[in-house]
Image (cartoon, grey):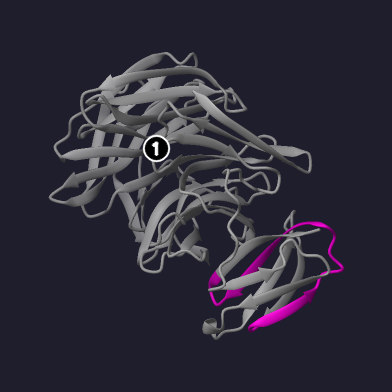
Amino acid sequence: MVIALNSIASFGQAGWEKIYQNEAATTFTQTLSKKYILAGAEYESMMQRWDVFQTDSLGIIEWDTSFYREAEGMPECIKATADSGYIIAGYYYTNPYLLKFNKYNQLQWESEFNTSYGEIYIKDVLNLNDNSYLCVGGAVYSNDNGLFITKLNENGDTLWTKNYAEFATGMSIIPSFDNGYYCLSNAGTLLKINDSGDTLWTKNILDNFASSSMIKTPDDYLLIAGNEFVEGQLIFLKVNQYGEEIWKKIYASNYFYNSCNSIATTNDNGFITSNYMETSQMNVDGLWVMKLDEAGDSVFSIYAPVKLEPKEIFQTEDGLYLFLANNMYGTPRLVKTDSTGDVITHIPKLQPSVETIYCYPNPFDDELNICLDKSLEKEGLINIYNVVGTLVYSQNISFDEKIDTRMLNNGIYFIELKIDDKIFTNKLIKE
């Protein structure tokens, strides 16, 4: 049941937020018919309740179903299929579990298969040209996680299974430029496999790196997202077809720990990301939506100080961005940004911490004060971008700086502070 709908308008394009109080959803996708399919599970009455529901383009539920399982399980990913249907993959009890629906939301088949590797769960699934499916995930045995890949035919029957005990959990799988596939583990290992699951090569792309997702870039390379283990900065790494680094970008917020949960391409050859920020203090976790250009540089960052963990994000046909998020109680919501990337969360937006950078007043008029924490003891580069990503101001500062902003038109701007390889960003408004 939908219990909330808010909207905001900016430059003629509005954002909205739908909250689904009585549904569970941990993953979603857009179907070929431009509907949204969401799936999730939660514990209810000594059973595990699985929810699958479809919404229209405004997030209004058009169809939903629930069914119960005797043991714990969870959908991990959902993907549109070539027949205009969709497939849901995850785990049930200790086994991989898949559900295939047609375009009429009718269940065509379900596949639960036992393995000799102990607990198995699927993190990503790929629909191949012959209507078979390639799945990647994790195999849990002896308190360690191994990478697991299986291929199923169009009816969900197992064709072959591979377990790579030397690697960590598989997170993403995508086609390569030839007839093989790239597979990413959550410990920063990239594998190239052939159609039979045989390893062609492996590459440790980055040390101390928790990799979370991988996509193919418009120029047929790979973009890998994750975070650094110790300091928790976001890391975006573009590699070529052989896993060799092309560029690497590191971003930090004022939070202790940051993680990238999803990244997608945009129609300008850039990228949109949904990220989660955590701190040791209570009630100050937050979500972070960040737009990158094709070189990985930040176009804008939007923070919201809410206890919401964002999931998949992508750009919609109208150029806005849509993502799924869950609060600490598991209540899901679809959030669509406005035309500036701003999000609706019922809570005022996060202001920058004086521990790093402080801008005032905000909104500003003819003058903007920028203050850095003295403890940084380093000079930083300040860049200011307008709402379409054009650089309108750039200057090095060491502590305090007053900027004459009379030349700027009224509107929304994004300020970026670069110190070494770290980047801090925030949104400003001139009135």
Report x, y in % for residue 311.
46, 43
**SS at mark 1?**
loop
Tell me the amino acid under the disc marked 1.
Gly
Residue tagged 1: 330
What residue lies at 62% left-to-right and 28% top-to-bottom? 58
- Nearest to the observer: residue 417 or residue 89: 417
Q: Is residue 277 left or right of residue 369?
A: left
Q: Is residue 94 left or right of residue 290?
A: left
- Nearest to the observer: residue 296 or residue 204: 296
What residue lies at 32% left-to-right and 19% top-to-bottom? 67
Can residue 332 be seen here? yes
Q: What secondary structure is the stretch in magenta mostly built from?
A: strand
What residue lies at 74% left-to-right and 38% top-to-bottom? 13
Residue range (magenta): 397-422
Which quarter of the image is occupied by the C terminus? Answer: bottom right
Splitting the image into 4 quarters, where does residue 46 fall?
top left
Report x, y in % for residue 238.
51, 59
